[in-house]
Image (cartoon, coloured by chain):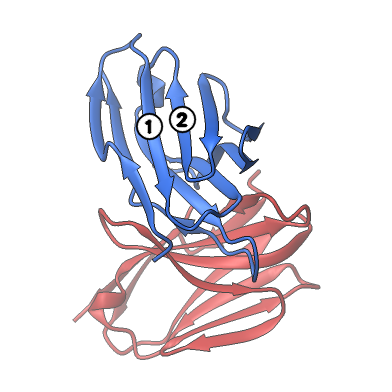
């Protein structure tokens, strides 16, 4: 069993749709990290959060520590949002991350 | 941009040969990490370092060794490459201050034939 589970694994959306990607974890964490990876590309940091909600442009990340769950939302999705979205849990030790297997998002024009 | 480079970016090697991958950072952060990324798996930690000559094993460290003789460089060595080590390897750093989010290098695609 993975310590970090993401759903869905794959997601196809029409341009303009509201998108939600979920991340659940079973370990004690100090923070949750959302990352983006474009096809053939590098890995880019989107958000790091330990409570509440963060917003950057059309991206919103929320976390519920009690329920051990985080969500990444994309409003007004665009084809350039097509990528793999990865969540990673920073362990309480503060030194190591556990990663989910990623959600592959395709936004169709 | 955390100033992280990896070399080589692509490598093809034969089974049984030694291979060394290099990660270089320009900002003197203490924590550096080596991960491998394979289909169906999340990024998995191979080794990490928390300072010069200070390293520790991750969950998939068998067959790999690391060295860190300078703050800016973290080397990953496959002593005798096997086909199961065909993967994309990412180096990452965590800033010493702030929220400790990770910043990744561009990756090295390694193929062991």
Q: Quadrant of the C terminus of chain A?
A: bottom left
Q: Quadrant of the N terminus of chain A?
A: top right
The residue that appears at 26% across and 40% down in the rendered structure is B9
Q: Chain of mark 1?
A: B
The residue that appears at 58% across and 75% down in the rendered structure is A71
Which x, y percent locates residue B25? 43, 51
**Residue carrying label 1:** B21
What element does badge 1 sit on? Answer: strand
So how many labels did they put on this image?
2
Q: Tell me the colour chain B is drawn in.
A: blue
The residue that appears at 35% across and 87% down in the rendered structure is A17
Q: Tell me the colour chain A is drawn in.
A: red
Precedes in sequence: disc 2 or disc 1 = 1
- Near-viewer residue (B111 or B96): B96
- Give the quadrant of residue A108: bottom left
- Mark number, residue A76: none
**Residue carrying label 2:** B76
């Amino acid at each position: 069993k993975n310590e970090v589970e993401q759903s869905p694994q794959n997601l196809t959306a029409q341009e303009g749709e509201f998108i939600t990607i979920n991340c659940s974890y079973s370990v004690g964490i100090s923070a949750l990290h959302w990352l983006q990876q474009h096809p053939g590309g590098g890995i880019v940091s989107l958000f790091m959060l330990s409570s509440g909600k963060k917003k950057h442009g059309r991206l919103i990340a929320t976390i519920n520590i009690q329920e051990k769950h985080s969500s990444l939302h994309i409003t007004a999705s665009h084809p350039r949002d097509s990528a793999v979205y990865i969540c990673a849990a920073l362990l309480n030790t503060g030194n190591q991350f556990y990663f989910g297997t990623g959600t592959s998002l395709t936004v169709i024009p | 941009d955390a100033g992280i480079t990896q070399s080589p970016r692509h490598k093809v090697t034969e089974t049984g040969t030694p291979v060394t991958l290099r990660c270089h950072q320009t900002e003197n952060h203490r924590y550096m990490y080596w991960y491998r990324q394979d289909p169906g798996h999340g990024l998995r930690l191979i080794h990490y370092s928390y300072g010069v000559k200070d390293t520790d094993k991750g969950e998939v460290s068998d067959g790999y060794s690391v060295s860190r003789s300078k703050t800016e460089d973290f080397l990953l060595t496959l002593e005798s490459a096997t086909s199961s080590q065909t993967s994309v390897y990412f180096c990452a750093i965590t800033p010493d201050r702030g929220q400790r989010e990770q910043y990744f290098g561009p990756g090295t695609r390694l193929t062991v034939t």
